[in-house]
Amino acid sequence: MGTTTTLIDAREVVNGGIVKNSPSSNRFDSALLSPYVQVMEIEYLKSIICDDFYFDLIAEKAGNVSNYNPKPNCPVVEAFPSNAIYENLWKEYLLPYLSFCLIHKSLPFINFKISSNGILETFTEYANNTGEKGFQIMRDEIKGTIDVLRENLKKHLCQNKDLYTLFCDECYCNEYDKHDDECDCHCDACKNGYHCNTKHCYKRKTVAPDLGIVFY
């Protein structure tokens, strides 16, 4: 078991090569991202997969820093070399999702600095900062990508929940079922005739076929 307390390593977000996990440049300093990894995973990941699944992924990964850009005398490094199911989940879903999430979480603290003189905007000698407007455009674009990747991750987990025995699917996965009037999340409210989604359970509607009236 590894001693790491987070799933992703900042170096996995900014590694150079053909396979890029985030919109950062190849020369991006991963140390700028590292302080925000833990809070990012609490905010963006643990709420989806629940604690047991989250900590099992960390234990299985055991501190491996994955890299899918092979170089001479440097082969591909898998995050989960002994667990094919977790490796597929990581490479296809978790790695791109968490990479964009970490950039999104860190960007305000990189673009602006908090000092004894207040909030300062960062400028460099060889490049011009785009300012607040450019910052917001980029952050909104990253947020849109995160939303797409999150839904893709949730859909994969729900449609393959038999593979992920630690995944908390109760009252969560019904939105991906083929039939809206069927509920298989097994919670008490669902068994009593309610339809479940990620936020709440609500009474199923019944449609009168002859009049088209909806009763609740």
Image (spheres, grey):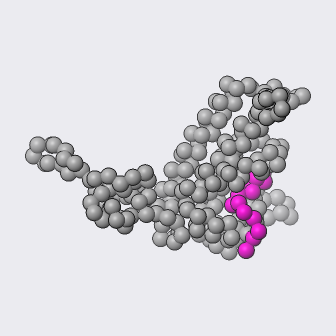
- What residue do we see at 61% from left, 34% from top? 140
- Image coordinates of residue 37 in percent, x first then y, are 71, 52
Q: Residue furthest left?
A: 210
Q: Is residue 189 above or below residue 40?
A: below
Residue 106 at x, y percent in the picture: 72, 43
Q: Residue at x 58, y 64 (%)?
A: 51
Image quadrant containing the N terminus:
bottom right
Q: Is residue 37 left or right of residue 89?
A: right
Q: In the figure, residue 143 lies in which quadrant? A: top right
By secondary structure, the bulk of the magenta-drawn segment is best described as loop
Which residue in the rendered view is the most extreme toward the right? Answer: 125
Q: Residue furthest front?
A: 116
Q: Looking at the picture, how far across and down is residue 24, in whole percent?
A: 74, 42
| Place of residue 105 in the rendered image (x, y in percent of width and height, measured from the top left) | 68, 43
| Residue located 58% across and 67% down the image | 53
Q: What segment carries the magenta color?
A: 1-18
Residue 9 lies in the magenta stretch: yes
Residue drawn at x 60%, y 51% is 44
